[in-house]
Image (cartoon, helix red, strand yellow):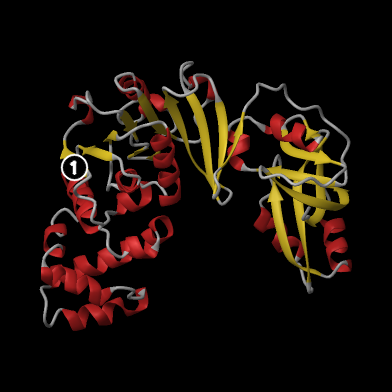
Amino acid sequence: MNDHLAPLLTPEGRALLAEVRGTAPADELAVATRLRRTHPAELVSAALAQARLRQRAAAKFGEADADRMFFTPNGVEQSTRASVATYRAERLKTLGVSSVADLCCGIGGDAIALARAGIRVLAVDRDPVTARTARANADALGLADLIEVREADVTEVDTAGWDAVFVDPARRGGRGRVFDPAAYSPPLSWAVGAASTARVAALKVAPGIPHETVPADAEAEWISDAGDVKEAVLWFGTEPGAVRATLLPGPRTLLGRGLPDPEVRPMGRYLYEPDGAVIRAHLVAEVAEELDGGLIDPTIAYITADALHATAYATPYEITDRLPFNVKKLKALLREREVGILTVKKRGSAVEPEELRRKVKPQGPNSATVFLTRVAGAPTMLVGHPARP
């Protein structure tokens, strides 16, 4: 990508990108062979590679934007999903922020969301290829007037004069994901220091960040999108010590109230599966109180209740059967119920869902959900189906 971005920005490159748009993997060889008769081979290869990246990026950015943007493999992998970036940008806007220093900007996904919220952005990345890609994306989406891209080491950038600082440190190394905040690049300790230079700051961190590493003067927010936990954000200049879970679309936000762990109760008629952001934020107790429910086990984040309640923060299931862990009994039950569409969920069980599916061989027109879990310490299978209040 570092040698191929500039040619793709030429009229010939842009025309070629339009021509290869949507090329299926099975057709690439034939398309490449045809195009190399009239275009340089390297340009054709670059265009096809970019088309593949755009197809992958559509899930994060939407097809309309992805078809105009430019990507690197790492950029697609590490970029914030557009819905999450938009939510964060809108929150900064409500905090009165009109300018943001976006440090470790990557290919510009967050800068784009900030600019679309009407916020002026300084987007900084030390990698030349990444910075050029971010600049190309600002141009492609008509946001160059609001986004200044700077190729620089973020630790050497003066952020004075900017209302807010946003830092998205790299959390991948040569061996994959980095879970230790001290091993982020730059480290979380540096990012916290950078946050102190602005009135408002937001630091994007891995959702698995240990709660004990969250600074006392930070607000911690866990964000999920369509049920998938995407990130955690440490906010400065907002509500020190606050903990919240935000669910997208919405947004719907649950604020922690410091409740003690819920009590363990006998298994009731309904099982509630809290959203992943709720679990990561340690706010299961707040949801259990809302549902007048309790835990099925002291170590398992499933809530049980006797009544069906509407809630934005957990998915309810009506439980029809409770079995001790026994594959043969489960197989017989599913055969009797003619269950061929089987959803398997697990929490607190070493058995993999696909392994169980292979063993029970579901067949029939009906559907069911099986939970592999523990109830009061005992390995248990709970059988039921989604419930609608």
Task: From the top left corner, tell me how far across and down residue 238 is, in percent.
Answer: 45, 24
Q: Quadrant of the N terminus?
A: bottom left
Residue at x 16% of width, y 58% of height: 5
Assign a secondary structure to mark 1. strand
Q: Is residue 26 above or below residue 57?
A: below
Question: How many numbered discs?
Answer: 1
In the image, 237 versus 371, the foreground residue is: 237
| Label 1, residues with CA under 10 Å away: few <14, some 14-19, many ≥20 | many
- Residue 343 vertical placement versus 210 (above, below): below
Which residue is denoted by mark 1 in the rendering? 149
Q: Where 293 falls versus 55 (above or below)?
A: above
Q: Where on the picture, by quarter, is residue 20?
A: bottom left
| Near-viewer residue (311 or 293) | 311
Q: Residue 120, position in %: x, y?
A: 26, 39
Position of residue 225 measured from the top left corner of the image (x, y, whole percent)? 53, 48
* Left or right: 157 as drawn, with respect to 227: left
Image side of residue 276 versus residue 351, left or right: left
Amino acid type of the residue that numbered disc 1 sits on in the rendered structure: Val
Query: Relative to the observer, which residue lies in front, 359 or 349?
Result: 349
**Image side of residue 154 versus residue 292, left or right:** left
Which residue corresponds to the image point at 69% horizontal and 33% vertical from the top-left? 284
With 224 as the anchor, is 20 left or right in this view?
left
Dividing the picture into quadrants, the one containing residue 337 is bottom right
* Along the line of sight, the residue nearer the viewer: 182 or 214: 214
- Residue under the image location 16 percent in, 64 percent down: 8
Q: Residue at x 45, y 45 (%)?
A: 84
Q: Please provide percent x and percent y for residue 318.
A: 82, 52
